Amino acid sequence: MKKWAPLAVLGLAQFLMVLDQAVMNVSITQLVADFDTSVSTIQGVITMYSLVMAMLMITGGKVGDILGRRRTFAIGMVIYGAGSALTAVSWSVATLAVGWSVLEGVGAALVLPALVALIAGNYRGRDRVTAYAVIGGIAGAGIAVGPIIGGWATTELSWRVVFVGEVAIVLVVLATVRLINDIAAVRRPQLDWIGSVLTALGLGMIVFGFLQAGTWGWIAPKDSPVEPLGFSLTPFMVVGGLGVLATFRWWEAGRVERGEDPLFKLELLRIPTLRSGLESFGAQNLILMGVFFTIPLYLQLVVGLDALETGIRMLPISIAMFITSSCGGLLSSRWPVRSIVRVGLVFVLVSILVLIGTIEPTLDGFKFSAAMSLLGVGMGLLASQLGNAVQSAVGDDDRSEAGGLQWTSAQLGSALGVAVIGSLVLTGLTNGFVNSVSADAGVPEDVKVALVASADAGVDFVASSDVNDALLAGGVDQATTDTVVASYEEAQLRSLKAGLLGGAFLALLALYATSNLPASVPGREPDEANRDPVDGAEG
């Protein structure tokens, strides 16, 4: 199947791009031990990876227009491979951050926009729909399989093994990159360096503000490094980022008036289909990352599963998402993109509601697996359509810019999903625990006062056994400890359900983002056989 050889190479790269973030998340404890550091430090390294990608994705798309998409893809893979190699042999937190957060982040920012543009250039018509559907399924598989691979490697061998494997994958991709047909731009534009700095700064401030909201507080300060006017730094960071982006817009308008190349064409955002596709991409990642934040908390800290067992329990998402998304070409030949995406969101909504019913002290394996499968089907339906909708809304010269916007939207959605759902869970845990303890007549007043005071800075989501041990170590008697632990466990379940309920509400809101996706089924007439399925569609 020579026709699908480029997709095999690009799919391998896509899997690599999403794999190690999931691996890192389940290896935090081992990383803390290996580098003799704190959990917050390792979480900071993980945060920096997302931050670097979000900051540079639009610029990475423009570089693809300047150097050529295939060359940019290859350069990005080399940088990513160098980052993986440094991560595998890292001897300190600093080298870990340079290898994983910086080099891999820069590499991904070059690879991903070029990757989606190369798919559009190598495939047309139904083949393009199928290719984007497969890539979407591979991305979902990487996210879901990552915890299994990371859990197994960390438990049985070392987390470093994963990054050695990544270097091997990079070498395979580079050895086969010539199977991909390059797509040359009509003219080679100039890079707007000032625009690049402004977008990187503005997007970086927004994403970092969202990611730190759980630590700093959304409005009222918790652990905020500074407290402007008595408030958390979060809203100032986000609003400041929006201000920088407004400055970027002014700067770009000036460049266009002077006849200079903009970083990206602002008029692209006025294309209804593209705008709706970007909004849907953001919503998809927002919901998915929010759920992926919540479910491991339940499986590991409530049910008591380890990282590998958690990954296995979440595997139905990966399987269902890959199978469903692979059917994208067949589905879009019968139903409109808008209808398919909306049905996907309904599946997501139903799956979250079923998940809420499974959040109990004892795991109902069958119901949980069913919910995970439904979620995978819903996300697969979205993944099968959105990539093609975004790329087919623009011409060949704008593929890389659209790819940069696509992945920027995805990163913003991921950051916001973790921030919003995480905030709902942790705030719900704190409020639920404080209210339950305060109303319990079986808890002595001095213990209530001490617990409420300690909860002012927020309650951490930990195993109830840790709460039990801490109370006993603090001199609290066993009977009172049992009562407080029971209140904490109840608050855990309620907060997890609140977080998932927030995800369900977001799925409902996401239906609005689909309003300008294509609402017809083109390409059925014989003379349209080679036409892009949604080219030029604007709703």
Image (spheres, rainbow, N blue to C red):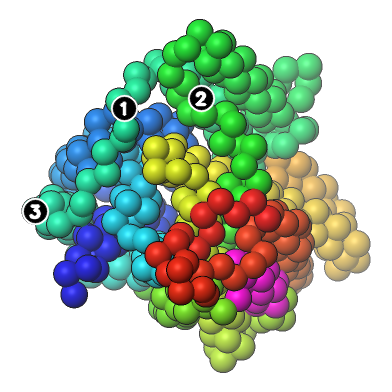
Do the residues bearing badges 2 and 1 touch, measured as CB atoms within 8 Å?
no
Instruction: Report whether residue 459 is seen.
Output: no
**Stretch of the chain drawn in magenta:** 335-352
Residue placed at 60% from the left, 66% from the top? 337
Instruction: Please name the residue that numbered disc 1 is placed on.
Output: 187
Mark 2, secondary structure of its residue: helix
Q: Is residue 315 above or below residue 209?
A: below
Q: What is the three-letter code of the residue carrying label 2?
A: Thr
Give the percent coordinates (x, y) of residue 202.
Answer: 56, 24
Q: Position of residue 307 (x, y in %)?
A: 40, 68
Asked whether residue 82 is in view, the answer is yes
Q: Which residue is mark 2?
A: 199
Real-space CA distance between mark 1 and mark 3, rounded to the nearest whole angstrom: 28 Å
Residue of label 3:
175
Q: Is residue 401 above or below residue 369?
A: above
Q: Name the mark on residue 31.
A: none
Residue 496, horizontal then vertical, whole percent: 68, 65
Identity, as a three-letter code, of the amino acid under mark 1: Arg
**Residue at (39% x, 38% y) in the render:** 397
12 on left or right of 113? left
